[in-house]
Amino acid sequence: MAGIVGILAFDEIWNVSKFLKYSLMGLQHRGYANSGYAVLNGKISHGYFPSPPEDIEINDQGWAGIGYTGSRKEYPLVFNDMAMVIDGVVKDDLKSIAEKILSNPEKLSDVRGAFSLIALTSEGKMIAYRDESGLKPLAIGGFGFDMAIVASEMPAINVIGGEFRREVNPGELIIIDKYNIESRKLKEPKKSYCTIEYIYQARIDSFVNEKPIYELRIRIGEELAKERPINADAVIGVPDTAIPFAIGYSRVTGIPLDLGFTRTGSPIRTMMASNDFMKIVGVQLKLNIVKSAVFGKRVVLIDDSMVTGTTLKNTIFSLRKMGAKEVHVLIGSPKLISHCPYGVEVPSSSELMAANLSDEEIAKVLGADSIYWLSIEGLYKVIGSRELCLGCMLKTYPKVI
């Protein structure tokens, strides 16, 4: 998982370094273990950090730049005359991709993979490309008439005062310099949008594949209420992703919505934690139970997904410890039963609880009174499209690599 951004000013008097940092902060929900940047000011200067964007300092100045936040070290990739960042998976040699960009950016249509890419050349051109599957999102916007911005998601544009214009289409190439923004259709779209983007990955204030994420997640909660109504006293969503699910569920069932958690410490996304210790401790670093919201109550606990079950088990234990009488778990996605070969942090089937145990066994292991997952048909209904990749849920993958 990764977040990428590129900013190019139309006048060299600008310094985009601070804009880069804060844009990356708007993307660190997509990955935060490592950060990096490359800026242009006569030549390309770059830096890498084993830390999230909020902790980095970009001391190099330049009128154009690209940035990365995610799991990979030493990104952006820097070659003699260019730098590039990639969200996703490519099968081609990275140096050969750089050579394609420098010789003729349209050759990106030959690159095999599921990816979005942003590159910056020493000549002052920024190149962005989204492969024809559209598995990885990419948006374009601007800062008045002064800058062009390309980023994984809309919030990276908004947080620096920019204006979101539109999404880059699958198979579309964007070339930007100080004088022009050019769009070229390199390939016909073969849309296979990632369902994890809708359910978990994208920020709730984002707009991905023409879908407003906040509204879509509320509809997931409403669909869960229709599929699995539960007699309970309180509905609680695990922050931040599942809160809209809980809102939707509460609206349909009439069960009061409670804020059962308060944030403490760093907003860690435990699905992307690097080790088991952080998956467990990360819950306490991120959330603390509000005792009065759960004590003596039958609680409907809604989460966005379940991978290994480690985080959810610890959360349920904490609810019980604070006096919850019953805990019924609803998951806002279908079961995750297989790995993701396209860069989402979903491990192999052997590590996925839903792939190896029955619903009754899972509830027992977690310490829950019951557990239920959104149905596949319910997911299709909410999203309103079947142009989706559900490989991690069905073990059937689009042929994009």
Image (cartoon, helix red, strand yellow):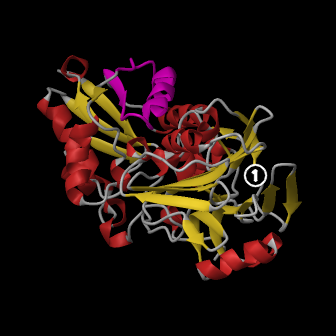
> Which residue shows up at 44% across the image and 29% down it?
246
Magenta stretch: give its range. 233-258
Give the x, y percent position of residue 83.
62, 65
Residue 292 sits in quarter? top left
**Residue 370 locus on image (x, y percent):** 29, 42
Question: Which residue corresponds to the image point at 32% horizontal and 72% vertical from the top-left?
Answer: 350
The residue that disc 1 covers is 168
Whether residue 346 is visible to the viewer of this picture, yes or no, is yes
- Based on the picture, tell me whether residue 114 belongs to the magenta stretch: no
Is 181 on the left or on the right of 369, as rendered?
A: right
In magenta stretch: residue 247: yes
Where is 234 relative to 330, above or below?
Answer: above
Quadrant of the frame with the C terminus: bottom right
Q: As drawn, is 191 to the left or to the right of 223? A: right
- Answer yes or no: is residue 368 visible: no
Q: Is residue 141 left or right of residue 221?
A: right
Q: Measuring from the top left, give residue 332's x and y in whole percent.
A: 46, 43
Residue 219 position within the rendered picture, expressed as x and y whole percent measured from the top left? 58, 33
Residue 274 found in image quarter: bottom left
Q: Residue at x 49, y 37 (%)?
A: 224
Q: Nearer the viewer, residue 386 or 161?
A: 161
Task: Determine whether 345 is above or below 329 in the image.
Answer: below
What is the three-letter code of the residue carrying label 1?
Val
